Amino acid sequence: MNTVQKSTIARALVALTALTVLVAAIPTANAATKTITCYKGTVVKKVTTAKCPTGYTTTKPVVKPTVAATTPAAAKGATVAFSGTYTGKISLLWGDSYVQATSVDGTGTGNVLGLTDLAGIGSSAPANQCDTFNGSGTLSGGGNTLKVTFDSSARACAEDANAPTGITFTGNAIINGGTGKYAGATGTLKVTAGSFNIQSSTAGKKEIDSFKFTIAGNIVTK
């Protein structure tokens, strides 16, 4: 075999060997660079091996949907404590045998559950210095209202037989529904200390006086 033939055969063998090495290396390179995702509970791991480590799987775990928070069942028919003090103005028309509160407007502070505004009316036909009265009103705020009506326990007492004089009043305000979150509400709120002063000594005269009362009880939501 001459030198040229040997050189040609050598080059062919080198080329063949290089091609063989290249072909053999391709799968290995692909395997080395391929990334798979492995899961174990909430742990996610990306690896370049042919399979996941022990304890891991390529199957992605099913995530259970989050259950939206709901209002506890106790929120319906719940008993909510209420207590506060209301102050404001009362418009009066009074005579020898009657007293009319044509309007009552006030603002409350304390644990009034957002019901900061008071509006109402009342009337009485007193035969004694202490006698019953009729009254109704609404407590409101934040788009919600609570309706109340005084029951037969409501009493107003004058300090003196003749005006001007101070008036104190107490009684149970019965809840008879409302609007918003107090729709259908029930319960009893008790006025423990209420007062205002009649300023005029002239019967039949209208006047506007300051009032204040403390009220507390329970609201039962529907």
Image (cartoon, rainbow, N blue to C red):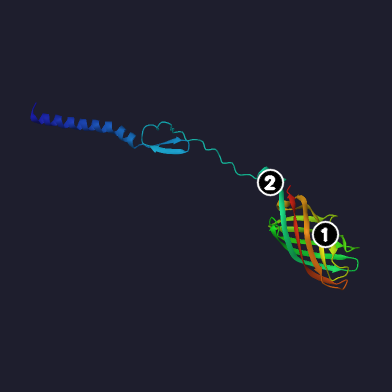
Q: Identify the residue at horizontal 77%, vertical 50% (top origin).
A: 187
Quickly name the residue at label 1: 135
Between 22 and 167, the one nearer to me in the picture = 167
| Crowding near the residue tagged with mark 2, few <14, some 14–19, many ≥20 C-alpha atoms within 10 Å | few
Q: Residue furthest top?
A: 1
User: Residue at the location (68% across, 46% down)?
Assistant: 75
Residue placed most toward the observer, 124 or 117? 124
Q: Quadrant of the N terminus?
A: top left
Amino acid found under the numbered disc labelled 2 = Ala
Tell me what residue is drawn at x 79 percent, y 70 percent.
Answer: 208
Q: Is residue 14 above or below residue 71?
A: above
Please name whichever residue, 133 or 100, is drawn nearer the observer in this view of the structure.
133
Q: Where 119 sits versus 26, above or below?
A: below
Q: Residue furthest front?
A: 159
Q: Are marks 2 and 1 in contact (CB under 8 Å)?
A: no
Give the vertical position of 142 relative to 14 (above or below).
below
Amino acid on which disc 1 is placed: Gly
Q: Quadrant of residue 4?
A: top left
Task: Judge left or right: residue 164 versus residue 71.
Answer: right
Snapshot quadrant of residue 86: bottom right
Q: Name the secondary structure under disc 1.
A: strand
- How dense is the environment of label 1, judged by Cα within 10 Å: few (below 14), some, or many (20 and up)? some
Position in image of residue 41 (x %, y %): 48, 36
Residue 116, position in %: x, y? 70, 60
Q: Position of residue 150 (x, y in %)?
A: 82, 56
Q: Position of residue 21 (x, y in %)?
A: 24, 32
Residue at 24% of width from left, 30% of height from top? Answer: 20
SS for callout 2: helix
Of pointers 2 and 1, the one earlier in the residue sequence: 2
Report the disc number at residue 75.
2
